[in-house]
Image (cartoon, rainbow, N blue to C red):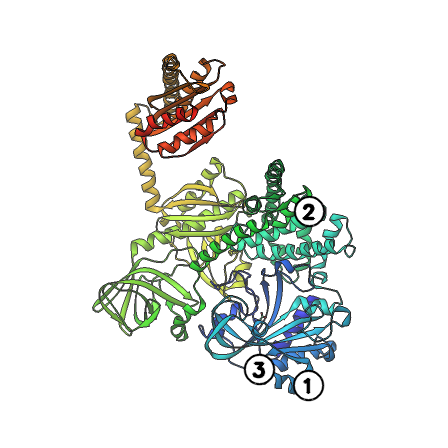
Amino acid sequence: MQTADIRQRWLDFFAQRGHTIVPSASLVSDDPTLMFTVAGMVPFVPYLTGLVPAPYPRATSVQKCIRTNDIDEVGKTPRHGTFFQMNGNFSFGDYFKEQAIAYAWELLTTSEADGGYGFDERDLWVTIYEDDDDAFRYWKQVAGLPDERIQRLGKDTNYWSTGQPGPAGPCSEIFFDRGPAYGADGGPATDDDRYVEIWNLVFMQYQRGEGTGKGDFDILGELPKKNIDTGMGLERVAFLKQGVENMYEIDQVRPVLDRAAALSGRRYGADHDDDVRMRIVADHVRSSLMLIADGVNVSNEGRGYILRRLLRRTVRAMRLLGVDTATLPELLPASRDAMKAAYPEVATDFDRISRIAYAEEDTFLRTLASGTNILDLAVADTKKKGAAELPGDTAFLLHDTFGFPIDLTLEMAEEAGLQVNRTEFDRLMADQRSRAKADAKNKKTAIADLSVYSAFRASGETVFTGYDVLETETSVLGILVDGASVTRASTGDIAEIILAETSLYAESGGQEADAGTIVGTGFELEVLDVQRPVKGLTSHRVSVRAGEVGVGDAARTVVDADWRRGATQAHSGTHIVHAALRQILGPEAHQSGSYNKAGYLRLDFSWNQGLSAETRSEIEDLSNQAIRDDLEVTTRVLPLDEAKALGAMALFGEKYGDEVRVVDIGGPWSRELCAGTHVRHSSEIGLINLVSESSIGSTSRRVESLVGRDAFRDLATERAIVSQLTSSLKTPREQLPDRIAELMANLKAAEKKIADFESRQLAQRIPELVSGARRVGAVTLVSAAVGSLRSSDELRSLVTGVRERLGSDAAVVALAADVSGKPAVIVGTNAAGRETGARAGVLARAAAAVLGGGGGGKDDLAQGGGSDVAAIPAALESISTSLS
Ligand code: SER
């Protein structure tokens, strides 16, 4: 049974039983506590917690998921994939335990001919939560399972949550027994590889709190409703139904594995380690393809880092298979071809996806080369010292800066006959992880914190009137202070205000929130921020400037008209710059992010090289041409498919509903899906002044522009500067660059003359210093304070000059000076001096200690510094004492 068939049977089965089919959400989760969509239930969390009323009582989906916590198991077990698809059926307060169990049993055991999966009842086992007697009873009643095939297990395995505070509940897992050839008897409680978990039924009726490991969390209370969340592993059922050994051999994955085998010239099935490597490649290539398709780009943190890790582990596995050239151009298309039937975007968007993946492979191959140099040096150094272990900080540097997985370092060290100090490496990694964790914790908003909004959201969506009007009469539905619902707020308070309607734009789609006020009888609120903490609900963060506001009061939202004009100019400007970029660079220059506010816009786009000055001017010219052409700006709301058919540009990683707003500037000249506020005619933008273009990673660039009045003001400032220069240099504008270049050249020549003169003067001091030489211990010592100097370079050249004049008898020169207010001492020795045991580094360090600082260097020349100029005589004295 092909994977596509298993998927279709699932959707048909549940659709026939009253479930709404919901398309897969993006891998990039909406939930701020989760980096990725890790389960089929993630997009439904607001319905499970009751934060947002569920639009349907039952739903079913086949959800793309990413989990990387078991990344080290990939390829070693039959069932661990970093990317996988989870078939789910969900009930939001509708059916519960008994019906969920009945559906699962029916679909699994109905024959293939009748639309089911045709599993033999005798091969199926289940586990339940230890005290879930109801589940036990239903499994006996509904499925007729004998007692010994229903195993009771603890909270660590049979109590499910996403690992974060949020919805949770006891669960019941269904397993397929692959038979005695795969492991010991005794059911799922005994053996993981023989009994493969295929389906998890979660009876989701509780809210869990904070906690770390599995099962280590408190239950805070019941959810408003009893829900069902189930997840069947599509890949797992596929490998069992396709009669293959593991999930890497199914129709959607195997082609990549075969490609890896062909490229390496090794045979799959011949060697265990090689097999694992090929399976890692097959898994990671597919995960990378799907992640990039959902808008993830390579970076050093968060999601981008996970993507980078997957791609680098692929390169690494291929290297261990004996291929050290780029292989993604072969592997990625194989994965695309296996996945495009289920996810057509991996083919239509392949240009962009492959560009990102191939660039990362090239970068890593280069990095591998430079990292290898570092490793070679460290190996040589370690051997020179006669040690057997590479220091942990070298391994950490290679990991952190060069992206070397530790096993790569271990292996390369081993090739050189060395071990690696793992303890130190692990400690550095743990330090880094706890820093990252602390950082992530600061950024997170737990789902639980959002629950306060659910009551407001339950009474409906906040209506946005601000496309048409700047002011709206409305009423106050709720007030929050410090996250808690209150009835009033008064002068000086910072509060969140929930209204029935608002003309104030909430930050979204790259556009900053509106500035403005909310006023009513007896109160005035200054709007600090406008956000949508949950879908459909707008919250206004305000400072109460005067009076007191209460729930139920009538209020008027007032947008600052000047601010809004600037914001609409900037947002329409962003669309224009995007269209201009694509006309000039080509359609691959696709927007990957944007930000705009009154007077300013920033646009990030996929592109892997800097823009020349000419290209920048061209983009700016074309943008301003579009402004002068006075293009009409129109908006309309259409079904998503129709909008896409019209060629409207959607953004990666952005979520769209069934109905979308399309913004046209000059008809199809610029056509984007966008919910922002816009000017009515492009000429209202006034002016676009492209002020910067920079890199934000290997495949992305950023342009920044000033817009409207701010654009003009910036140019006016430049004009003022130029006119100041023309008058002070008495040079016409056009000749300014030449004139400045000429002045710079003159200045350089003058500086050189001064430097020559000063060094001659310095040299003249040498004879006098030499004449002060005296015998101390076994050497001739010149030791003197030479006053103030401009740099320690001057001091150094005095020391070497004196040393030269002292000839070949044992000599030490120690000179000190005040360099820009700080004491400096430099010590030099000649060869004969060193033979007597004098070491410049040791002497300089000792003198520096007297000066209140540190120092060091080689045996022949060394430098020290400090903070106390008055200590110079004592410092010099310490040198002569230690020589005598
Ligand atoms: N959320 C559960 C899981 O991921 C069932 O869908 O296993």
Look at the numbered disc 3 and give the secondary structure of its residue.
Answer: loop
Label 2 beta carbon less than 8 Å to ligand 1: no
Work out whether residue 116 can be spotted: yes
Give how far apart the Cα atoms at labels 2 and 3 are: 50 Å
Q: Amino acid at mark 1?
A: Gly
Q: Position of 835 compared to 310: left or right? A: left
Q: Nearer the viewer, mark 2 or mark 3?
A: 3
- Amino acid type at circle 3 is Asp
Q: Residue at x 30, y 29 (%)?
A: 870
Q: Quarter of the image for the C terminus: give it.
A: top left
Query: Crowding at label 3, few (<14), some or many (≥20) Cα neighbours within 10 Å?
Result: some
Ligand 1 occupies quarter: bottom right
Residue 240 figure quarter? bottom right
Label 2: state its secondary structure: helix
Q: Please tell me how crowded label 1 is: few (under 14), some (14-19), or many (20+) other residues with Cα within 10 Å.
A: few
Q: CA distance from mark 2 to mark 1?
A: 52 Å
- Residue at which label 3 appears: 132
Which residue has dot 1 on it? 144
Residue closer to the observer: 756 or 525: 756
- Nearer to us in this view, 46 or 624: 46
Residue 522's image quarter?
bottom left
Q: Nearer the viewer, mark 1 or mark 3?
A: 3
Q: Nearer the viewer, residue 739 or 584?
A: 739
Q: Earlier in the sequence, mark 1 or mark 3?
A: 3
Quarter the N terminus occupies: bottom right
Front residue (pair 408, 841): 841
From where the camera sits, is residue 464 visible? no
Tell me the kind of residue under disc 2: Arg
Residues tagged 1 and 3 counted as in contact (Cβ below 8 A): no
